[in-house]
Image (tube, grey):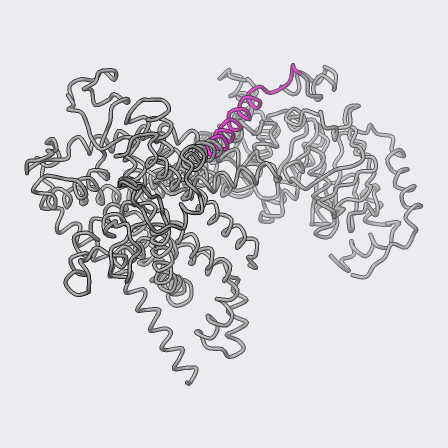
């Protein structure tokens, strides 16, 4: 075959592949939103779920997802940021550093069900806590830390070398340089990464099935005492999240309106992830502009 | 470049050793047999140099000759490169600053450095200067105000920025930014000022201002400057060292280097035959 | 301040002693080192605890490991209980390799599109599309598989819809963005001189891509595929929702099947802690862990062979 014709054909194939991917995304979003959005009413978002009747909502699941996300990020962000600082600024090339890198890589590539199993083993079996929010958050922490470490390391490494040298040459310690020069400069990158990671945490289910559990006790949103059993803030209560809810109604649900609930919940989940995505880009660029602006 | 050193190595070394002792002025940095390695590469080879107090010492030579490596070893900035290693001694105030137990943080406050590319922090002009001062415990607002003004005056920047101290340093021109970097180094009251090609990224007017500034600062500070610009070296410096391939080929009074150098290599370089 | 202390001796000022040591540096270093140690501890803890738990079925319940891995009979609750997990290993490997087989050409093709054919459209449209695809939670993929794909397969293809095939399709869609992202980075990091050199010799774009660019990027492209496979292998819920979860080796791609992850997911909550069945499930967890180690080793090996 003529090489020019082959070239044309190949180009056509590549365009087709690109078109397939765009079509795939459009279809998925169309499906999720077209089926889901009609279900997402104020009532759906604010009423309790039902285990056998139709018409249940997702109030508790939505709250649980957000609450577990917040707790996970409270634990992960400092650990991941400081870990990333260590890797970017303190780790010397050598055996130890390459071992730590292997550990991070391993944590990053663990299947989330394995992380869930580890959580089940430690928090439920060994410590006897049962299914708890804190157990779920710690399981999510395990697979979120490597993300935050990588994000922080990249963000710090992308700070111009001149900024670091300027501070060190003024007789400022490395640590103070990190706190006052590197981290502020790297902040937009870290924030963007953290929000994107939040999207991932928000949609995670497998790691939570056997750590935070498949049920939620009946909650009293007026009770803000974090030690009370019916308080939404209690971190030692089981908590079914939105993603877990989608899975559980589909696989073991008894309600007659499985499709409607799952459609609505999927739409909420995907919209949340979308919002995280857009927020990350927008905030990142706004702060970056602010930091590097002329005035 | 297929140049080889005419004289055998030993004789040259002896000659260089003499340089460091033949001057009458007080020596603030005595560099003895300094070698700097990056991995296996020897970037500076057994350099000897006595750097005088309250004088301007210029380091010249083609790119990659080791002059930047040399100046960065004086305040231990080379420590940032994991594969770098130094041998020999740099005696400052009676102490070899290459010792592993030297407090590099304190050292860098006494031996300040200004870099090739202006690198102000993305903060206000005022905070650029107070950044390091505050870290060192100076919290008094009045004292800070005073130091800011003094150091900006010393850096010949005060009149241009006194009305906009709280604007971002990034709003300044390149030349102003570089003088701000000098001001912020001066605020630490260093004894030695290391300038690594401070004017090479600037326009001619800013360049001239920096040169003027260097001549003023010499009254109070000992200055070492790396420069690519030979006429600049001849204008501002008292002593000049010519580096080539990691060797200090010649170190002498600037006047002598530029009018009657002892080494043919030096003459070839300053007359623009290579580099 | 420097000047105030100039009068004091150089030794006091410049030699690191307790008095002039910067404690913030010491504390900061301790803080970040602690975080690094926590990461090491977490990794080691996961390995040790899962290994200890996962080995119990062999050491406490005396199940023969070879029989466990190779027997095709999984019948943990019957009279003559038998614990052969080969069908699940087979299922896991089948979905992993088949989905990689489909996702690899598509993902690499999309990567080449973004880096070689139309970088502008790639950056403006395809890149965000891929990032959004990555962001869709796996349960949503599973749900759509369940309500769209499974009925579709049931109506037009043999079997009842729940099948290995459905699992492969869902996983392909899920790992496609992973493969594409990494492959795109690999293609973009190729030096421009490679392209120009080849085009200057009169090669067409396709010839350049096939003969020069793909071979140069090969180790990184393989890394992209392996990481995609790792994701497919470890995915639990999305596959579980469409694959049917039966204990037999599928006779055809349209038969129901099960994977290690789906069996663990479904059963570990229902079995009593310490029972033989429970222990054999933990052993499957250990196998998942070991195989994800192997994936990392392969990725390491490939990145060691990276030429550019």
Residue C281 visible (yes or no): yes
Which sits in the foreground, A105 or C281? C281
Expressed as whole percent of the image width and height from the top left, the position of residue B113 reads 64, 34
Compared to residue A86, the image places residue B202 above or below, namely below
- Asked if the stretch drawn in magenta spans residue C21, the answer is yes
Q: Specify the quadrant that holds the N terminus of chain A.
A: bottom left
- Residue at image position (9%, 39%) is A255
Q: Specify the quadrant that holds the C terminus of chain A.
A: top left
Expressed as whole percent of the image width and height from the top left, the position of residue A94 reads 62, 39
Compared to residue B193, the image places residue C168 above or below, namely below
Residue A2 location, quadrant: bottom left
Taking the view exactly as shown, the residue that stands out farthest to the bottom is: A2
- The magenta region covers C18-43
Residue B32 location, quadrant: top right
- Asked if the stretch drawn in magenta spans residue A87, the answer is no
- Residue at image position (51%, 66%) is C215
Compared to residue A210, the image places residue B259 above or below, namely below
- Residue at image position (76%, 33%) is B55
Residue A81 visible (yes or no): no
**Main SS class of the magenta portion in the image:** helix
How many numbered circles are shown? 0
């Amino acid at each position: 075959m003529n090489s020019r014709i082959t070239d044309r054909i190949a180009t056509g194939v590549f365009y087709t592949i690109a078109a397939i991917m765009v079509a795939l995304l459009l279809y998925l979003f169309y499906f999720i939103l077209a089926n889901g959005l009609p279900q997402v009413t104020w009532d759906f978002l604010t009423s309790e779920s039902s285990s056998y009747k139709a018409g249940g909502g997702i109030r508790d699941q939505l709250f649980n997802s957000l609450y577990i996300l917040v707790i996970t990020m409270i634990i992960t962000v400092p650990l991941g940021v400081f870990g990333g600082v260590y890797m970017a600024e303190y780790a010397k090339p050598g055996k130890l550093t390459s071992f730590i890198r292997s550990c991070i890589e391993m944590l990053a590539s663990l299947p989330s069900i394995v992380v869930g199993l580890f959580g089940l083993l430690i928090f439920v079996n060994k410590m006897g806590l049962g299914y708890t929010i804190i157990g779920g958050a710690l399981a999510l922490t395990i697979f979120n830390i490597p993300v935050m470490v990588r994000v922080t390391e990249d963000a710090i490494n992308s700070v111009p070398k001149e900024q670091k040298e300027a501070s060190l040459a003024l007789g400022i310690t490395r640590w103070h340089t990190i706190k006052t020069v590197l981290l502020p400069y790297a902040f937009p990158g870290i924030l963007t990464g953290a929000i994107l990671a939040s999207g991932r945490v928000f949609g995670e289910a497998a790691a939570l099935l056997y750590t935070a559990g498949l049920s939620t006790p009946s909650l009293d949103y007026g009770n803000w005492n974090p030690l009370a059993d019916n308080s939404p803030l209690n971190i030692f209560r089981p908590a079914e999240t939105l993603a877990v809810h989608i899975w559980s109604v589909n696989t073991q649900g008894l309600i007659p309106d499985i499709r409607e609930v799952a459609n609505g919940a999927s739409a909420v989940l995907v919209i949340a992830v979308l919002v995280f995505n857009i927020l990350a880009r927008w905030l990142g660029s706004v702060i970056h502009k602010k930091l590097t602006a002329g005035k | 470049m297929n140049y080889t050193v005419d004289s055998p190595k030993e004789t040259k070394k002896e000659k260089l050793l003499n340089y460091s002792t033949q001057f009458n002025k007080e020596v603030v940095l005595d560099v003895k047999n300094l070698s700097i390695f990056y991995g296996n590469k020897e970037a500076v080879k057994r350099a000897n140099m006595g750097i005088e107090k309250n004088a301007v010492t210029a380091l010249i030579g083609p790119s990659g000759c080791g002059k930047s490596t040399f100046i960065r070893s004086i305040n231990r900035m080379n420590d940032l490169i994991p594969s770098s290693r130094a041998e020999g001694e740099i005696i400052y105030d009676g102490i070899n600053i290459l010792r592993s137990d030297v407090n590099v943080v304190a050292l860098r406050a006494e031996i300040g450095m200004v870099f090739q590319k202006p690198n102000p922090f993305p903060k206000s002009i005022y905070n650029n200067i107070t950044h390091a001062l505050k870290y060192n415990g100076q919290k008094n607002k009045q004292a800070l105000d005073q130091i800011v003004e003094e150091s900006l005056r010393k850096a010949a920047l005060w009149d241009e920025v006194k009305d906009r101290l709280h604007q971002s340093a990034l709003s300044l021109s390149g030349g102003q930014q570089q003088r701000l970097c000098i001001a912020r180094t001066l605020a630490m009251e260093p004894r030695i000022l290391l300038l690594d090609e401070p004017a090479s990224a600037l326009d001619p007017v800013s360049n001239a201002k920096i040169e003027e500034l260097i001549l003023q600062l010499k009254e109070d500070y000992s200055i070492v400057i790396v420069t690519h610009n030979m006429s600049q070296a001849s204008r501002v410096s008292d002593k000049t060292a010519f580096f080539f391939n990691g060797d200090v080929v010649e170190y002498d009074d600037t006047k002598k280097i530029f009018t009657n150098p002892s080494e043919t290599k030096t003459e070839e370089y300053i007359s623009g035959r290579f580099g | 301040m420097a000047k105030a202390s100039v009068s004091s001796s150089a030794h006091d000022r410049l030699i690191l002693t307790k008095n002039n040591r910067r404690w913030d540096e010491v504390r900061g270093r301790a803080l970040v080192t602690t975080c690094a140690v926590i990461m090491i501890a977490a990794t080691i803890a996961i390995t040790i605890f899962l290994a200890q738990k996962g080995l119990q079925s062999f050491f406490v319940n005396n199940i023969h490991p070879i029989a466990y891995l190779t027997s095709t009979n999984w019948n943990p609750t019957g009279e003559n209980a038998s614990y052969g997990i080969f069908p699940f290993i087979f299922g896991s490997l089948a979905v992993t390799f088949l989905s990689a087989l489909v996702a690899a050409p598509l993902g690499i093709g999309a990567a080449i599109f973004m880096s070689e054919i139309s970088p502008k459209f790639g950056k403006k449209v395809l890149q965000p599309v891929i990032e959004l695809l990555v962001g869709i939670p796996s349960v949503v993929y599973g749900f759509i598989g369940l309500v769209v794909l499974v009925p579709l397969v049931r109506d037009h293809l043999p079997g009842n819809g729940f099948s290995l095939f459905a699992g492969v399709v869902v996983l392909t869609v899920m790992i496609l963005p992973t493969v594409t992202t990494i492959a795109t980075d690999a293609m973009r990091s190729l030096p421009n001189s490679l392209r120009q050199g080849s085009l200057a010799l009169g090669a067409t774009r396709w010839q350049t891509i096939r003969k020069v660019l793909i071979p140069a990027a090969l180790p990184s492209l393989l890394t992209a595929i392996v990481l995609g496979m790792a994701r497919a292998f470890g995915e639990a819920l999305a596959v579980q929702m469409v694959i049917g979860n039966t204990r037999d080796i599928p006779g055809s791609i349209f038969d129901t099947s099960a994977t290690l992850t789906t069996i663990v997911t479904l059963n570990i909550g229902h079995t009593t802690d310490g029972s033989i069945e429970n222990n054999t499930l933990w052993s499957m967890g250990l196998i998942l862990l070991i195989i994800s180690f192997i994936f990392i080793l392969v990725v390491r090996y490939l990145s060691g062979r990276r030429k550019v």
